[in-house]
Image (cartoon, helix red, strand yellow):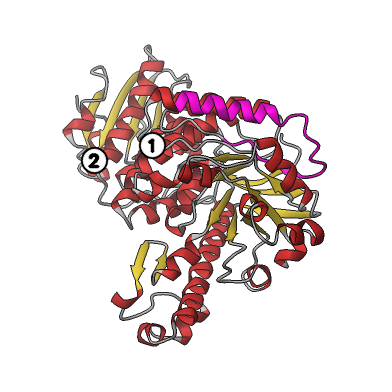
Amino acid sequence: MNDVFELRSADAAGRIGELRVPRSDTVVETPALMPVVNPNLQTISPARLENEFGAEICITNGYIISQSDYREEVLSTGLHEFLDFSGAIMTDSGSFQLAEYGDIDVTSAEILDFQYRIGSDIGTPIDIPTPPEAGRERAADELATTQNRLESIQDIDTGEMLVNAPVQGGVYTDLRERAARDARATGLDIHPIGAAVPLMNAYEYGTMVDVIAAAKRGLGPSSPVHLFGAGHPMMFALAVALGCDLFDSAAYALYARDDRYLTVRGTERLPELEYLPCECPVCVAHTPDELCAMPDDERETRLAEHNLYVSFGELRRIKQAIRRGNLLELVEARARGHPAMLDGYRALLDHADQLEAEDPTSKDAFFHLSTESARRPEVRRHHERLARLSVDGNILLTEGDTNAAYDQSWRVVPPFGPFPRALSETYPLTAEVPERLDDAAYESAASGVAKLVEANPAAEFTLAHRGWPERALETIPERVRRAPLESMDEYEERGEGEP
């Protein structure tokens, strides 16, 4: 495991961890939000970020400082004193400026050395953020340049400063996975996934998920991961479930400047609100009309405060969900708030096998909330176990009770399918399932039946079901006898399934 990152709790690929930052002698609990501090324009001071909002880490732009009039002051006093922030400070390298303006007059080695000399705790070399619209050849060329720059800094003395190894590759998942393996091989400390901002700005959350999943495959489970530019609380739960640990947000200030009000369901425009749907101190103390009537600077500050309260509150909610083992239920709730988030959630479940590898086998409860619930890692794991089970004799698979006419009577519960009754009180088979189930749950249960039957060709099986849809029954192997289960009383009177 990475020697600066320690895992504490996990759910899906999400985790609560501890990032040790030796230069500032701090430990940052992840997932963590890093508010972006613009050294030229501070809507909320770093001291307030730390003392009022609980920020343990922030991020500022080392390149801007290197080009500024106060460069020598920061070199003299140190970054922590200059910003008045005692937690961990990450510095960016100017990659954003490179992407925006096409060139910057500094090398990776020079900017990393400058970050070290001003007292940064986590420094960043210059990578090339490849935009989503770039062709594969350009993405591969720019990735090679990024990798060369990572190799060029290997001999630079950075002392106790941690160093980022960014992961690029555009929207090409094979390039992302390769880049992640190469970044991990450098032995550097933290791995930012770059150039995701255009995908988020375009609400292309499905593509974003595929990019993150590819990077995670290359990085493995022990690497701390920073999702660059992910500052909207609407998508924190989704990104955490994929295994992202650090988020940087300039959104709290940029959105406030434009009278935009962040929520976990999306963004609202302040002039269009009649009520403030939040319990933070700003929203409790003011009405939308009162905020709109404030001078611009004051309104901007109040909105930035609200945006921070919502963002930090969502991360606390996510951590509690990880502790309880219901992170995916929170992701699903957020997915129902916006169609693009639902695309992201469905893309997440396309990687259920990858999530399952890190997902704990025991949790608090499983809630079946929608058709997507049938695709969760827990269901996949159960089906894989069914494919390995050995049974013999005449087996009843039933939604009803036991029947003495059979050698064994297994329970069947959608979306999982069959399981021995002795496991009825084990996770996730204690699932809370609605009475009005969707077809996807039955189809998933039928897939589980098929897994068990195919693994045991010598056994005889009867499925007693309560009106499963035809599409689900088509999944059941032909040699399985089927018995519609109108009621338990009628079934017990018959004594056996009808062919």
- How crowded pointer 1 is (Cα within 10 Å; few <14, some 14-19, many 20+) is rated as some
Quadrant location of the C terminus in the rendered image: top left
Image coordinates of residue 118 in percent, x first then y, are 76, 53
Instruction: Tell me which amino acid carries mark 2.
Output: Asp
Check residue 158 for magenta coloring.
Answer: yes
Element type at mark 2: helix
- How crowded pointer 2 is (Cα within 10 Å; few <14, some 14-19, many 20+) is rated as some
Which residues, given as a range, are shown in magenta?
Answer: 139-166
| Left or right of residue 372: residue 377 | right
Q: Which residue is mark 1?
A: 132
Q: Is residue 335 above or below residue 199?
A: below
Q: Is residue 24 above or below residue 258?
A: above
Image coordinates of residue 26 in percent, x first then y, are 77, 55
Image coordinates of residue 426 in percent, x first then y, are 52, 42
Q: In which quarter of the view is residue 95 placed? A: top right
Mark 1 or mark 2, which is nearer the start of the sequence? 1
Image coordinates of residue 334 in percent, x first then y, are 39, 56
| Left or right of residue 81: residue 123 | left
